[in-house]
Structures are given as structure tokens and as C-alpha cells.
Image (cartoon, rainbow, N blue to C red):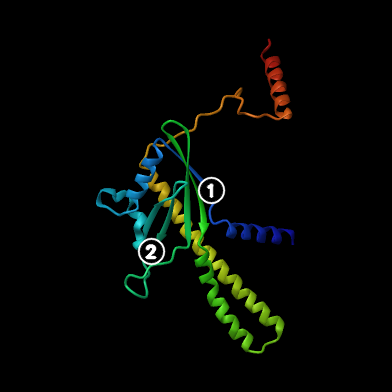
Amino acid sequence: MPYVLLLLERILTRLRRLHPPVMIAVRATPADVLQTLTLASRPRLDRLHLRDLFHNGRRYEVVRTKEAFQVTSTARLFWGASRARTPVAATVYGGFITPSAGLTLVRLHVGASRLTTIRGLLLPLWASFFVLALSWPLAPSVALIGVMWLLGWVGARLNAALQALELVFFVQKALADLPAGELPALAAGSPDVVRTPGERDFQAMWERFYNEKREP
């Protein structure tokens, strides 16, 4: 039983979090990053290496914000009107961190569209009225309505998670055209490195053990 509860907890945690935060380091300025993303959002013949980003008629919109930028995406529907497109289910928000000159850290986090989540619950809401009109016993009616609402919410979250994965892949693929950056490692004696008393004791014991073994 504890394993089942742990599994359910992990599933619910994964559904609540569409995508873990992503950090990309590039050797470019924030303006260059924005320009690269804007150019990559439009399919062009001179960027054939990005053609996989536009399968199924997918299009991206890069919007500059006060913090940095945000990216949304839609795809062509295979039914309905010829110009019908999927709704925006997720948004990738980007932020900039510049630890040194010429090095930019692009931090990405994902948010779900509330409107799309509400749309996913409209069908269960509509079906719930039919279940209540059937005059079934209370327990089966409540259970069926609960299952329909849960499936509607899970479906909306999975749709948003899939779109979030595609958006993060777009940003990573587009920024691959820029020189990759690398964060410098902190020195062991740097004041930015915090060590607990246990770590300091272990370091001292290790140095003493190493010096004893080196002695002839």
C-alpha cells in the first residue's frame, strides 16, 4: 500500500509540474539571444537544420517581456476549418542572468494556460448534467462524475506538458546556433563556497590520511 501511495504522489507531482526548469549557457548577449529566437521562430530556407521544429504546421511566437521573453506555439488541426489551429496550452517564460561579460544564462520555466485547462473541463461538466438526470444512486453518480472530471484535468495537463516539451526543445534547438557557454568553477577556498563542519573535518582527516600514506 505505501508503494501505491508513493506512485500516485509521483504521478500527481509530475502532472502538476509540466516541465522542470532549464538553464542554458551561451556566449552571447541577451539581445543576441532574443534575435536568434525571433529569427528561428519563422521557417526559412537558410535554416533547414531547424525544419523539424515546424512539423504539422507548428508555428512559434516569441514575445519580449519586461523580464526577458516568452514563447508560445500552435499547430495545424487536421479537422475543421483549413486555417484552424490548436489552442495555446503552455507558455515558456525566459529570464536572463549575466554572471560575466559575454556570458548569458537563459533560465526557462513553464506555465500552463488556465483557459485551456478550463476548456478541458467543459466536456466533463456537460456530461455531469446527464449523469445527474439519470436518477442513479448517489454513490455511482458521484464516482462517475469524479472520474470524468479527473480524466478531463489529466488530459488538459498532458496536452500542456506535451506542448511545453516542444517549446523547450525549440529554445534549446534555436540557441544551439550560438556559442555554448561554460560557467567557471569556484575555487575550493572561495568565500562563495560554504562548507559544513562535517565537511571540513572530513577534509582534514583525508589530508592527514593521505600524508601518512605518502610517508616512506
Instruction: Characterize the local packing of mark 2: few (<14), some (14-19) or many (20 or more) Cα atoms within 10 angstroms.
Output: some
User: Is 31 placed left or right of 128 in the picture?
Assistant: left
Check the image and name the residue furthest to the left: 45
Type of amino acid at the residue the image marks with label 2: Ala
Question: 61 and 143: which one is in front?
Answer: 61
Q: Residue at 44% across / 54% down in the picture?
A: 167
Say which label, 1 or 2, has the lower sequence index: 1
- Residue at which label 2 appears: 75
SS at circle 2: loop
Q: Where is the N terminus found, in terms of image quarters?
A: bottom right
Q: Residue at 41% across / 67% down in the picture?
A: 86
User: Is 76 placed left or right of 111 in the picture?
Assistant: left
Q: Are marks 1 and 2 in contact (CB under 8 Å)?
A: no
Question: 14 and 29: which one is in front?
Answer: 29
> Percent from the top left, x then y, of residue 15?
58, 60
Q: CA gap, disc 1 to disc 2?
A: 24 Å
Q: Where is the C terminus found, in terms of image quarters?
A: top right
Question: 149 and 7: which one is in front?
Answer: 149
Type of amino acid at the residue the image marks with label 1: Pro
- Using the image, tell me which numbered label, if any, was put on residue 21: 1
Total numbered badges shown on the rendered structure? 2
Check the image and name the residue furthest to the front: 66
- Using the image, tell me which numbered label, if any, was put on residue 68: none
Q: Is residue 38 above or below residue 156?
A: above
The quadrant in which residue 203 appears is: top right
